[in-house]
């Protein structure tokens, strides 16, 4: 079993991917240290979701290399990874608890008592306890998003890929999610989160600004804000600064 | 050989999903009966019905098995759960095997309901052993589930899957001997008919029901259907590869 506690969680070297003739990820290099929350930030079409799907192993790179937890993405390390796709991706006819229990079993939580305990724990965490026996069809968009997150974290993975996890959440729940995410990183887990909202970006330990399949800037939120040269710059200002100047800041490779 | 637990988990989930969807369950049972009834009342001669019923049975099992599995598998893709499964530790064979096991249960239920409906309501005669006829129908059901899985893996959306029905099922209906004996077709059509699984399903069912033969007598039909099922199962798992893109 790979050691997930030391070394970078993800290493990407000159990665490229294209759909037909359209280049979606373009010679991208990246290193994500273990135990942090890492945000992929950029507009729609920047290549965030494709990058996550490459890192999870759902797509095969056209060029370049990927090491996830020190290994090429494969089913061998899939139990160490949690993946929350952009769409809720749940079984509509099943209840919340049945969905989460299914993924708990798929992710090898074999002991029935431990599994039941963990499933109940994550349902409470995403604040769906009162709705646990409802069919997914009868849930609101935000509730589906929460149930989807629960399916991704039920096996306590050391590396978690979350594709736009806070879409559709109310502000209170968003804060709750981020408290939980920060708790996970304190416990040594690594989170790679894609988002296009600056609110999410501000919570991340490190950020990569993405545009047209490339990383245009990389650093902590403070470093990226300071790179604009403005005293009160927001992350939005920082993003626009790097888009306008087209350069890569000194922390990016 | 021990069944992988992920296969059983996936099969259990499929059964759970369908059981919670009452309308679908009703349709699974009622629609084949409606079609069988239409055939039953529209055939004026009882002897013709005796000859046609085995073919109708085999064709309907193949058709509904294909349809049910194909559409369900495609839903798994369109609602994003297939992607989630592909990112998990389960193997492709677990996924395809889980589908086979899960839908097999419904194929068996459909087979039983159709068979007993035809023999009790339309008094269709049969001369073979009941259990042998049912075992062979289950084999046709397995083939149908494998075929549905394979073509839904190939289809990228619902529209493409719907196109596979006239492309894959309808020619088999015309060529399997349901309407006209295969031996009286032009030679090139006979060659084509003999390459299609439904032909063997119909011939095997007729041999069991009309001629009173047993499973050992229809070894060729069983062999061809089993080879189709295994081949399509393996092809489905290959086509459903991780890292596709």
Image (cartoon, coloured by chain):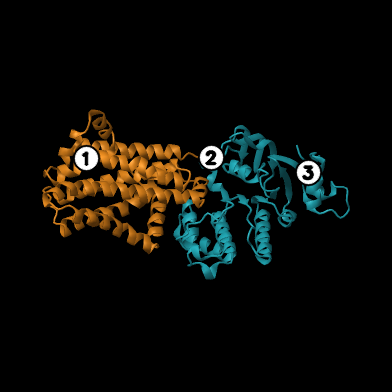
Q: Decide which of tag 3 and tag 2 comes sooner along the chain.
A: 2
Give the number of the disc on residue B177.
Answer: 1
Element type at marker 1? Answer: loop
Do we see residue A107 in this rendering?
no
Q: Which residue: 64% across, 58% down?
A: A167
Q: What's the residue at 18%, 47% (across, down)?
A: B52
Q: Colour of chain A?
A: cyan
Subunit that carries the residue with mark 1: B
Instruction: Tell me which corner region of the image, top left, top right, bottom left or bottom right, holds residue B143.
Output: top left
Disc 1 to disc 3, C-alpha distance: 67 Å
Q: Are marks 3 and 2 in contact (CB under 8 Å)?
A: no
Q: Please state the horizontal and vertical placement of residue A108, each as a whole percent of the image.
A: 48, 51
Which part of the image, by quadrant, shows the C terminus of chain A?
Answer: top right
Q: Residue A195: image x %, image y %? A: 68, 52
The residue pinned by badge 3 equals A243
Q: Of residues A107 and B150, which is closer to you in this image?
A: B150
Numbered mark located on residue A74 in the image: 2
């Amino acid at each position: 079993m790979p050691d997930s506690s030391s070394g970078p969680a993800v290493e990407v070297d000159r990665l490229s991917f294209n759909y037909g003739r359209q280049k979606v990820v373009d010679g991208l290099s990246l290193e994500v240290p273990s135990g942090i929350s890492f945000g992929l930030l950029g507009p729609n079409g920047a290549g965030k979701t494709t990058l996550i799907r490459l890192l999870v192993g759902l797509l095969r790179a056209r060029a370049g290399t990927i090491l996830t937890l020190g290994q090429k993405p494969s089913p061998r390390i899939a139990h160490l990874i949690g993946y929350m796709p952009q769409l809720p991706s749940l079984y509509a006819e099943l209840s919340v608890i049945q969905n989460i229990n299914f993924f708990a079993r798929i992710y090898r939580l074999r002991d029935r008592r431990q599994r039941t305990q963990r499933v109940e724990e994550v349902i409470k965490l995403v604040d769906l306890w009162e709705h646990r026996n409802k069919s997914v069809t009868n849930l609101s968009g935000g509730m589906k998003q929460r149930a989807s997150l629960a399916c991704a974290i039920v096996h306590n993975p050391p590396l978690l890929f979350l594709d736009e996890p806070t879409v559709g959440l109310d502000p209170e729940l968003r804060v709750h999610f981020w408290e939980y995410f920060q708790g996970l990183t304190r416990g040594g887990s690594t989170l790679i989160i894609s988002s296009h909202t600056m609110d999410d970006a501000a919570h991340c330990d490190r950020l990569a600004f993405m545009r047209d399949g490339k990383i245009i800037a990389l650093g902590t939120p403070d470093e990226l804000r300071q790179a604009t040269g403005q005293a009160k710059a927001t992350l939005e200002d920082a993003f626009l600064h790097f888009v306008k100047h087209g350069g890569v800041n000194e922390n990016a490779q | 050989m021990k069944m992988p637990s992920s296969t059983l988990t996936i099969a259990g989930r499929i059964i759970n999903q369908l059981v919670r969807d009452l309308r679908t369950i009703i349709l699974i049972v009622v629609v084949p009966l409606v079609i069988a009834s239409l055939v039953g009342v529209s055939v004026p001669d009882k002897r013709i019905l005796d000859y046609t019923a085995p073919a109708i049975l085999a064709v309907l099992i193949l058709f509904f098995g294909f349809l049910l599995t194909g559409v369900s598998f495609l839903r798994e893709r369109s609602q994003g759960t297939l992607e989630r499964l592909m990112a998990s530790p389960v193997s492709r064979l677990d996924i395809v095997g889980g589908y086979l096991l899960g839908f097999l249960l419904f194929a068996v239920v459909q087979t039983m309901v159709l068979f007993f409906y035809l023999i009790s309501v339309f008094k269709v005669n049969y001369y073979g052993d009941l259990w042998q006829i049912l075992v062979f129908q289950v084999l046709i059901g397995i083939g149908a589930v494998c075929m549905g899985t394979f073509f839904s893996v190939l289809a990228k959306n619902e529209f493409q899957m719907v196109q596979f029905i006239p492309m894959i099922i309808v020619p088999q209906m015309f060529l399997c001997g349901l309407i006209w004996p295969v031996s009286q077709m032009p030679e090139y059509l006979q060659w084509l008919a003999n390459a299609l699984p439904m032909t063997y399903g119909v011939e095997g069912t007729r041999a069991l029901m009309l001629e009173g033969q047993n499973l050992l007598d229809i070894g060729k039909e069983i062999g061809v259907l089993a080879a189709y099922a295994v081949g399509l199962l393996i092809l489905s798992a290959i086509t459903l590869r991780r890292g596709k893109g």
